[in-house]
Amino acid sequence: MLDEADDIHPLFQGAPSTTEFRKLRKRIIRNVRMAIEEYGMVERDTRWLICLSGGKDSYTLLAALHELKWRGHLPVDMLACNLDQGQPGFPSTVLPDFLDRMQIPHRIEFQDTYSIVTDKVPANRTYCALCSRLRRGHLYRIAREEGCSAIVLGHHRDDILETFFMNLFHGGRLATMPPKLLNEEGDLLVCRPLAHVAEADCARFAAAMNYPIIPCDLCGSQDGLQRQQVKAILDEWERNAPGRRRVMFRALTNARPSHLLDPRLFDFAGLASKPKDTNDVDCREFSALPSSWSDPSEPAVPGPASPAGDPAAARAIRGARHTT
Ligand code: SF4
């Protein structure tokens, strides 16, 4: 068992020996393993292309996957890959040096998508949409050339939540980045094993490990105001109600098509009532219901204080019962 093992993958050598860091590492590994199993990401004896940007999330992804493989929980071959997109000032030796030092098989590819993006996108617009499309195309090509069946990305729980709200607020749809996706051509999977990992955990982990982080703003563009606004809203909700992000993420894993409004997901037209056979009704079953019973399909509505603690409410309820 991972939690009982004292030894760790060489990638973690030099890691802090504090209890806090051990807990953090174990939590990340446990969450990654859970996502891999829950969403059936592994096809035995295949090859994964682990995509690294050099940011905190991609280092966390790399470390977690290598530790799981090292412990025998991940029966896939892995190739780390970085696409140098030609952004000005990109430190092109940082990742290859790190990967060489850690003896991690890798491929570094240079493709100047930065020039294409700056040429095509008007000055007042962000580059991200075109930049990501070009990057994804190259990653698919590299995966095919390397005999990989999946590209593996470092998007975490908060990326997934933010994308959900961006789609909700600006796109008019309930959708986000799924943990596992098949590309349009049907020959490659896109997997996100950090789906259950909080961004704050990635940040703490990468900082504690002292990984050589490559800044994410070298392109001079960002994902636009929309993502920043959504981030600020979620941060404020989390400040006012700690744990809110976790609860909202859990809701994404617990959708009820029959309680939404999309007729493509649920056959509302096919719903029809049937006359109830009154001979089957046993009125005694209603008298056995507790007085606090409510229809579980309806959302909870805040009610008055408990009658036990509020004599006026108790009198009102007794009166109401007498009239029915
Ligand atoms: S932030 Fe820069 S590198 Fe990242 S997707 Fe946007 S344009 Fe591309």
Image (tube, rainbow, N blue to C red):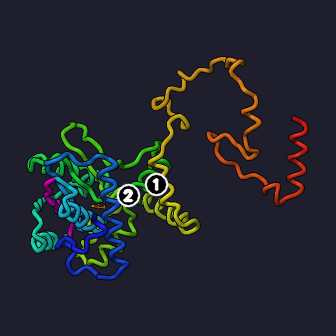
The three-letter code of the residue at mark 2 reads His
Q: Residue at x 16, y 53 (%)?
A: 76
Badge 1, how many Cα within 10 Å: few under 14, some, many 20+? some
Q: Is residue 183 above or below residue 57?
A: above
The residue where tag 2 is placed is: 196
Mark 2, secondary structure of its residue:
loop
The residue where tag 1 is placed is: 249
Highlighted range, magenta: 76-88
Q: Quadrant of residue 161?
A: bottom left
Q: Is residue 274 above or below residue 32?
A: above
Q: Residue at x 21, y 37 (%)?
A: 185
The C terminus is located in which quarter?
Answer: top right
Measured as percent of width and height from the top left, residue 23 is found at 36, 73
Q: Residue at x 8, y 48 (%)?
A: 145
Contact, mark 2 vs mark 1 (Cβ under 8 Å): yes
Q: Main secondary structure of the magenta part?
A: strand
Measured as percent of width and height from the top left, residue 49 is found at 17, 54
Near-viewer residue (113 or 290): 290
